[in-house]
Image (cartoon, rainbow, N blue to C red):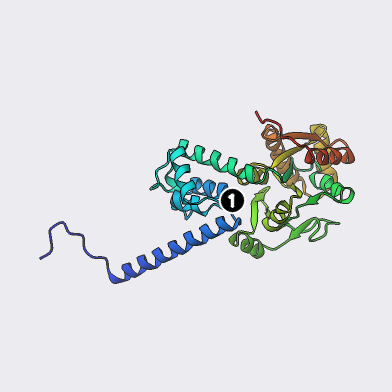
Amino acid sequence: MAEPNARPAPPEVDRRAASRAAVAARRARAALKARIASGHLSPLEVLGAAIANPEGVEGRMRVTDFLLSVPAIGATKMRRALSSLGISDAKRLGGLGIHQRERLRVFLAERMSRRTRATRLVVLAGPTAVGKGTVSTYIRENYPDVMLSVSATTRAPRPGEVDGVNYFFVDDAEFDRMIEAGELLEWAVVHNAYRYGTPRAPIQAALDTGKSVLLEIDLQGARSVRAAMPDAVLIFLLPPTWEELVRRLVGRDTEDSEEQQRRLATARIELAAQNEFDYRVVNASVPQAAAEVVELMDARRRPVRP
């Protein structure tokens, strides 16, 4: 006779479904650990994803497994780190408290900074129509020692743009595949229209050989890169005046009136974020702005951010 409060055994179909789900979860965690260990995923990216979605595969990962996946952290260093950070070895990434998250983030950022101190990733960002593409093209043509990262985008080429030089122009299916495969350092939907992303492999290959890389992206992408690679130097490109920004946007005649107004509204928001950046360069003259960016790439010391 069954006990009065005994829970009924789940049907066989439920047990099978639960078993399949458990196997899928283990495989997802194993794949995640492999991507961290191989360098395809930054530990800071994983921590950010865990905070954003505590019930996702990143959030469900134990802190012990996470740290052991980070290159050059073994069992001894892992235990020492958990002790100094005040984190229990039973904790999962998504279950960390606010202060624990911040201590872990600082620990990871400092560790990544020490490992990449000799390399330089420089991000050039700014509002729409400020001339980011024009300045980066000038650098490509006049400073051959600077490596420029080529972004992928789902938008169509503008007149004069060349696939593989200005952008990698891909369709939505290919962009989805790149996201799924972990091939993008960052990606975002820009102006509520098209997706842009930064292929990870060429950047990492250049940094591994000690080269500096210039990455021209939007504000969302710059923030993502800062989170993933805290040692990156961020440069904000400014227009001489607001009126000049409006003139450039209208003058290039690549958007209709409604789209122009939407981009100008976004530009006001983007301009307000300039203090998040390490340096600011005014694009009054393309050659001069390009020279300043290249000079900053050669700077030996980063400024202290407020």
Q: Secondary structure at mark 1?
A: loop
User: Badge 1, how many Cα within 10 Å: few under 14, some, many 20+?
Assistant: many
Q: Is residue 54 visible?
A: no
In the rendering, at what x and y percent does residue 243 appear?
82, 33
**Which residue is nearer to you in this view: 123 or 283?**
123
Furthest residue to the left?
Answer: 1
Q: How many marks?
A: 1
Does residue 104 appear in this view? yes
Q: Quadrant of residue 267?
A: top right
**Image quadrant in which the N terminus is located:** bottom left
Q: Residue, x 39% and y 43% (percent of image)? A: 88
Q: Residue at x 75, y 53 (%)?
A: 149
In the rendered view, would you say 210 is above or below 236?
Answer: below
In the rendered image, residue 150, in percent from the top left (x then y), is placed at 76, 55
Say which amino acid is labelled 1.
Ser
Give the residue displayed 65% in from the left and 61% down from the top.
Answer: 175
In the rendered view, tell whether residue 165 sits above or below residue 298.
below
Q: Position of residue 99 (x, y in %)?
A: 47, 35
Which quarter shows the C terminus? top right
Of all residues shown, which one is farthest toward the top?
Answer: 306
Percent from the top left, x then y, of residue 125?
A: 73, 42
Q: Nearer the viewer, residue 284 or 193?
A: 284
Q: Is residue 97 left or right of residue 235?
A: left
Which is more toward the observer, 240 or 48? 48
Q: Which residue is mark 1?
A: 42
Which residue is most to the front? 76
| Relative horizontal placement of residue 194, taking residue 137 as reference (left or right) | left
